Image: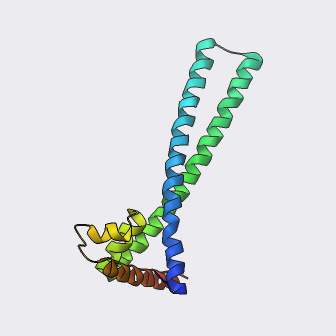
Amino acid sequence: MSLTREQKVAHRFLSSFDMVDDRLSSSLLALERAESARSSITGSIEGMGLSGSQGDKMCNALIRIDESIEDIQRMADGYSEQFKEVEDFISEVQRIDQQAGKVLRHVYIDCLSVKEVADEDDMQCTKKTVYEHLKSGLGLVFMLLSREE
């Protein structure tokens, strides 16, 4: 599929969601592990009644885990904002052109191929039609992006 320069800009913007989904999932997994490790260390410190250098090492590890948890939470917040931005643009396109918005949602949010989109129950059209809606939707996204600036 050949895209105009403007459609390519819109494609790159919407494609940023792919990275967000993966990074958000890995951040949440890391957050769960860090919180589990924090609980384990806290329990060990209390259970063993550690003091002195051993207790200091455990407390320092706990502080590093807490800092990591805060970093992961900030990253996850940033990723969710990026997802919301992509979602908002697709929703706006869908209000302007329902079919183009559906195609963008299937391609960029649901990660479906053009063939899979054409076969979707809510589409039931040819691949050529999906490409037409995709190009139209990308043009609308570019227009909306331009308006934002």
Q: Is residue 68 left or right of residue 85?
A: right
Q: Position of residue 36 (x, y in %)?
A: 53, 31
Q: Is residue 4 left or right of residue 123?
A: right
* Picture colour scheme: rainbow
Q: Is residue 51 above or below residue 132?
A: above
- Residue 132 in sight from this viewpoint: yes
Q: Is residue 86 above or below residue 61?
A: below
Q: Quadrant of the N terminus?
A: bottom left
- Residue 95 in sight from this viewpoint: no
Q: Position of residue 81 (x, y in %)?
A: 50, 62
**Camera-side residue of 4 and 90:** 4
The residue at the far right in this view is: 53
What is the tally of numbered marks visible in this picture? Answer: 0
Which residue is painted at 71% across and 20% down in the image? Answer: 55
Q: Position of residue 145 (x, y in %)?
A: 50, 80
The residue at the far top in this view is: 48
Q: Is residue 126 above or below residue 106?
A: below
**Camera-side residue of 137 and 113:** 113
Q: Is residue 52 above or below residue 106?
A: above
Which residue is painted at 71% across and 16% down in the image? Answer: 51
Which residue is painted at 63% across and 36% down in the image? Answer: 65
Q: Position of residue 69 (x, y in %)?
A: 59, 41
**Camera-side residue of 9 and 50:** 9
Which residue is painted at 56% across and 82% down in the image? Answer: 149
